[in-house]
Image (cartoon, helix red, strand yellow):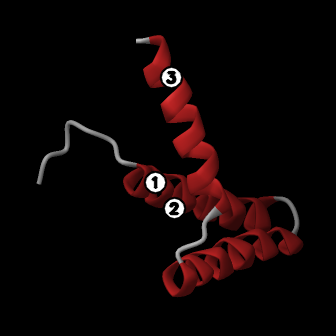
Amino acid sequence: MDVSKWSVDRMMFVLGGFLVVVCVMLSVLIHPYFIFGSLFIGIMFIIFALTGYCPGAIIVAKIMKKDNAHN
């Protein structure tokens, strides 16, 4: 596996995992309702798996396209 390139899918897994960890830590340290952030992320992963629609991937792809245009 070539790990020198960051695809949009790979970025989504990293971002999603990071946000789940942050939400769980916030729910433990700050307020239990932060667990709903993890629930939302999990639901979005399921929606992506079933439909292929991911708002985060659309945003990251646009950012990557804009960044590649400058190089």
Element type at marker 2?
helix
Mark carried by residue 67: 3
Say which quadrant the C terminus sits in. Answer: top left
Q: Is residue 42 above or below residue 57?
A: below
**In the image, what residue occupies the spot 11% across and 54% down?**
1
What is the quadrant of residue 68 in the picture?
top left
Q: Is residue 53 left or right of residue 11?
A: right
- In the image, 37: left or right of 68? right
Q: Does dot 3 land on a helix, a strand or a loop?
A: helix
Disc 2: which residue:
17
Which residue is painted at 74% across and 75% down in the image?
Answer: 40
Q: On screen, 56 above or below 49?
A: above
Residue contact at pointers 1 and 2, CB within 8 angstroms = yes
Marking on residue 14: 1
**Amino acid of disc 1:** Val
The type of residue carrying mark 3 is: Asp
Question: How far apart are labels 1 and 2 at the CA level?
Answer: 5 Å
